[in-house]
Image (cartoon, rainbow, N blue to C red):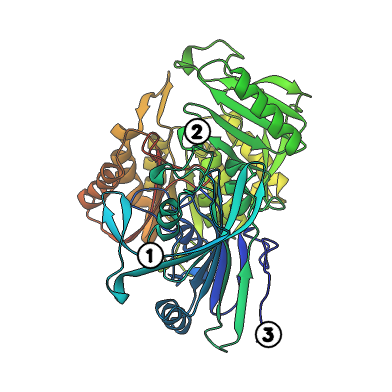
Amino acid sequence: MPAVDSYTSQKQSGTVPCVLFEDEHLLVVNKPAGLNTHAPAPYSGEGIYDWLRRREPRWADLAIIHRLDKETSGVIVFSKTALASRSSTRQFAERQVRKKYLLATDKPVKSPSATVVSTLVRAGEKYFSRPSVSPNDRAETRFRVRETVRGCTLLEAEPITGRTHQIRVHAADQGFPILGDLLYGGSAANRLFLHSEELSLKHPATAAPIRFRAEADFSADIRLGLRAALIDPRATSAHRLLHGAPDGWPGWHVDRFGDYLLSQTSEPLSDAQRKLLEEWSRRLSLRGVYHKTLLRRVQQAAAGENCPRLIAGEAAPEAFAIRENGVNYEIRFGDGYSVGLFLDQRENRRRFLSRYVGAGFPWRAASGGSLEVLNTFAYTCGFSVCAALGGARVTSLDLSKKYLEWGRQNFLLNGLPPDQHEFICGDVFEWLRRLKRKNRRFDIVVLDPPTFSQSKQFGAFQVEKHLGRLVRECLPILKRDGVLFASANAAGWLPEDFLETIKRAIAISGHRAAREHYVPQPPDFPVSRREPAYLKTVWLCIE
């Protein structure tokens, strides 16, 4: 195998922009700042490792070889085979892997080069340098000034060893803490100015030298950078750009829908918010910007109050199409509170489209034929369209005729004949009982109910109160070894309680879950302590 030199973010794979290189044994990624290497807790947001493993069957056996801090961007390598894992781990342990980082500091740098050797000792969330006394505890970093730009000095850092926070601690020890590294005395900035620029090792199968490189861009908006690393614009033109507190703006959310931005807050937009929207509109070459004021009592709002309003650029058509994972959906800004697609379900729609839930989770028709899918609370039939494109016959059930007609239009937008599928208008609980009486059985039942809804005919629905009942009503129409998909948008409902509600309902009904696959909201909906994960989803194979 020839040497691989100077790989950049011009990826080999056309599906995930951050992929730099992939072969049978290795997957090399340019990790964006703001994304963990792996999930820090069972029900927290996904790291790049978790997200990749759950995305493609060929990545199901990925293994972590080394890690980057959440706020550090750049080259990271994963193994795909046992051979690659053994070889790469050995190379890292024996210090045969050469790593080069780029950092920026606004502090004076006294020498053009320096070598720091110490032992790192942890105290709370920080590490401190102590004199090195044992080769086993040795931490060594070599620094070299590259250039000074606009009052900041760029330095190369070569860690000879690989200790946690090593470069950050050693830079601070030398009097030039990294810009944005508040933990170690750096000046405040919009990110940690540390980037894994280059990594060289021997290929695990051929022993040929290979080198991977990703250029740093510390001037880029990290919110846009996170999305650009994960979302292929050729396949997806609708996604979240700014997600509240984790992106530095509590209570403010901004979505892109094709050529338009949709901003949402409960308060009037500030001048700074308007300026950022205009900047993004120019940078992304968009046609218009809309804003929607989030009302506390949606049901009591006058007609038109729930609709987004144009605040810059040209007006959107009454209906226009966007793409998501290559699938077309119709969007309507003037049709009420919801515009036609909930973007936080993108990854779950992709699972229906690709027929891949995750490693070790079966996806097959119990009868051996085509899948029969029931999508309850179907709304505009996003899950239904993806399941149908994946080869399933779908029954879409919703209380609204208007939304089901919208769903039919989404079928037509993707070349799917609606008359080959079933659309039922009615109450979900009532129709679950009817389907049971008719002896209808499904391979997959989808439960993605609203958090709260109210109708004159059927009263109030609350997801925390009624999800268990929904699960019990679904099980009689689910085939043996069928899949139950349950999702809830309820910020105050703990994941453990959400899962317990579902499992209790399954047990009461005399069934059990043979397999379970829990997934949080997508990485472009990041989570933080100030704004924990709100979307909870579980796929269950029911015996």
Tag 1: residue type?
Arg
Q: Which quarter of the figure has residue 315?
A: top right
Mark 1 or mark 3: which is in front?
Answer: 1
Q: Which residue is mark 1?
A: 163
Could you tell me residue 183's position as x and y percent?
Answer: 39, 44
Q: Is residue 6 left or right of residue 124?
A: right
Tell me the SS state at disc 2: loop
Tag 3: residue type?
Pro
Q: Are marks 1 and 2 in contact (CB under 8 Å)?
A: no
Tag 2: residue type?
Gly
Q: Quadrant of the N terminus?
A: bottom right
Q: Looking at the image, which is closer to me, 252 or 301?
A: 252
Q: Which quarter of the figure has residue 47?
A: bottom left
Q: Which residue is mark 2?
A: 248
Distance in Å between CA atoms under marks 3 and 2: 44 Å
Q: Is residue 93 left or right of residue 332?
A: left
Distance in Å between CA atoms under marks 1 and 2: 29 Å
Tell me the SS state at disc 1: loop
Compared with 507, 141 (above or below) is: below
Q: Looking at the image, which is closer to me, 396 or 43?
A: 43
Could you tell me residue 348's position as x and y percent?
Answer: 50, 51
Could you tell me residue 11's position as x and y percent?
Answer: 67, 64
Could you tell me residue 434's position as x and y percent?
Answer: 40, 41
Q: Going 72% across and 45% down the picture, which residue do you hit?
A: 413
Residue 341: tell me if it is visible: yes
Residue 369: tell me if it is visible: no
Compared with 349, 365 (above or below) is: below
Give the crowd class for mark 1: few <14, some 14-19, many >=20 residues within 10 Å: some
